[in-house]
Amino acid sequence: MIFKNRLNFSSGCVDWVIVGLGNPGRRYENTRHNVGFLVLDLLSDKWGIPTKKLKFQSLFGMGHGAGVRVLLLRPQTYMNRSGEAVRDCLRFYKVPPERTLVIYDDASLPTGKLRIREKGSDGGHNGLKSILYQLQTDVFPRVKIGIGSPRGAVGASGTHGAPGTVSASGASGGLVGWVLGGFSPEEGPIIRDALEKACGATEEIITRGAVYAMDRYN
């Protein structure tokens, strides 16, 4: 693909930062915990914005998405330090938290279910917990993508985000093994549809606002 949407924005010239959460490295590709990265892959292709620049402990790219000046941010810190990358990027480009959209997985939602929020708690998600701590505010929109939960898994608090040992089935280690495992063949079409919807929700949020997107997608 030839990317035609590259822009060299200077400090203060970004309208929205769109953050996809995940863990870096081949081991974690296409796992439940990396759906934020997967949505960024689709947005990158759709908008022609490669995320190959390295800064802010992240891979990122800048350009126009849905007619808006955007920065796509893919933290490379591992999930529980994602906030450091987001903080550094927002400070450099002078983007307020309320114009920062975070996309991530949610084990409390059924697989494929979308939930959009304007603000809120971390819900036990270590990536979001790190962002809340570093930004010192919960007022930023987010798109949560349901990944389901394993039978018998005990609460997400303190476990949802740290890399751990995963069996071939991805089901070991309770919730940790679940989120770091891959989707089943039956879940494939469901999650692909959810990722496409998350892209649509992202465009609605940055052009028409989170409330409008909530009415359409929640």
Image (cartoon, grey):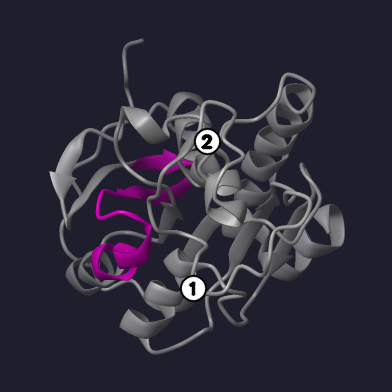
The residue mark sitting in front, 2 or 1, is 1
Give the magenta range: 63-85
**Relative horizontal placement of residue 107, taking residue 186 as reference (left or right):** left
Please name the residue shown 59% across and 82% down the image.
121
Q: Is residue 130 visible?
A: yes
Q: Residues within 10 Å of mark 2 (few under 14, many from 20)?
A: many
Name the image quarter holding the C terminus.
bottom right
The span from disc 2 to disc 1 (Cα, nearest Å) is 19 Å
**Measured from the top left, where is residue 214 in percent x and y?**
78, 63
The quadrant where residue 17 appears: bottom left
Please name the residue shown 70% across and 25% down the image.
184
Along the line of sight, the residue nearer the viewer: 190 or 28: 28
Q: Which residue position holds label 2?
A: 31
Q: Which amino acid, by three-letter code, is at mark 2?
A: Thr
The quadrant where residue 86 appears: bottom left
Instruction: Identify the mark at residue 158; answer none if there is no mark.
Output: 1
Along the line of sight, the residue nearer the viewer: 149 or 37: 149
**Relative horizontal placement of residue 86, taking residue 144 as reference (left or right):** left
Q: Residues within 10 Å of mark 1 (few under 14, many from 20)?
A: few
